[in-house]
Amino acid sequence: MSQISQISSTLKQLLRQHQITYKDIANQLDMSEANVKRIFSTNSFALDRLEQICEILQMSLSDLFIIAQKQTQQLTQLTEEQENELLANTKLLLVAVCVRDAWTFDEIIEHYDIDSHECVQLLAKLDRIKIIDLLPNNHYKSLIAQDFRWIPGGPLERFMEREVMVKFMAPKKEEPWTFRFYLRGRYSQTSVDIIQRKLNQLTKEAAVLNQEDANLPLSKRQHFGILMAMRPWEPSLFENLRRNEVQ
């Protein structure tokens, strides 16, 4: 994520925390709401405008930059030891996933078969292995970035391939596909690079949306899985028809 995109993302989070809307900003800066939305959607912040928005938040530009810098220091990848710790305890893995999706302590114990004492212990373990900072009154600060990736070929990736992806691609009868599309073709390396870049951007945008929705009540958020994959591949029924010299 570029620095200006990180600043914009941080600003959006701070505005949500202070319950300040684009309309509030427009009114205070004598602008149209549409213009404020355009500035945030295109990340086209003039320095003086950025300073004015910070004043609405009652902070300085340097405060904003410090907060944004701290957020860039979140974990984008766990260590193999951390991944193994999570996989050794199903409930610990579950709470870690809930933490990443900004569930509250009360939401976790209400939704899953985990009592409050056990949940405190699980959060304490996540704190010990440096995945969260555990705060007073069962609050926490996640140290995991929204767009974090597991170790290529590591414990979590092997677990995902074995336990998640196969089952994800075979939904139960009552589980509809919200979207499913398979595209194949023969592409140059330049085109492959472009597609990979766009897929990476989409994962970042999905992560931001997940973070933005975190302030909504759990009842207004539905659990979705998004699987994106790309690799050199040809169906075996086609591969078997290749001429020997091509193989």
Image: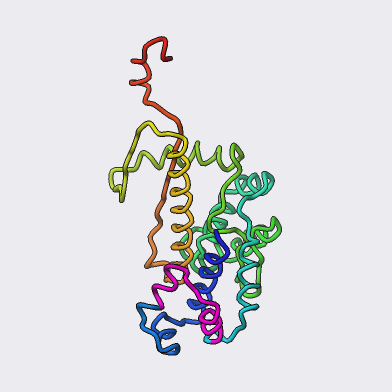
* Residue 175 in sight: no
- The one of 34 and 141 positioned closer to us in this rendering: 34
* The quarter of the displayed image where residue 139 is located: bottom right
Instruction: Look at the image and tell me in which quarter the C terminus lies.
Output: top left
Left or right, 213 with respect to 59, comes to left
**Percent coordinates x, y for residue 45 in the rendering:** 50, 74
Render colour scheme: rainbow
Q: As displayed, is residue 113 above or below residue 215?
A: above
Q: Is residue 78 left or right of residue 20?
A: right
Is residue 53 rendered magenta in the image?
yes
213 vs 13, nearest the viewer: 13
Residue 132 is inside the magenta segment: no
| Residue at 53% over, 76% down | 14
- In the depicted structure, whether residue 180 falls above or below residue 63: above
Return the residue nearer the eye: 123 or 230. 230
Image quadrant in which the N terminus is located: bottom right
Above or below, 10 against 242 in this view is below
**Farthest residue toward the top?**
244
Q: Is residue 165 visible?
A: yes
**Residue at screen point 58% across, 58% down:** 145
Bounds of the magenta segment:
36-55
Above or below residue 231? Residue 222 is below
What residue is shown at x 41% (from left), y 49% (from top)? 226
Residue 65 percent location from the top left of the image: 63, 73
Q: Looking at the picture, how far across and down is residue 75, in whole percent?
A: 63, 56
Which quadrant of the figure has residue 155? Answer: top right
Q: Main secondary structure of the magenta part?
A: helix
Q: Position of residue 174 (x, y in %)?
A: 28, 47
Describe residue 140's horizontal placement relative to residue 38 as left or right.
right
Residue at x 48% of width, y 50% of height: 200
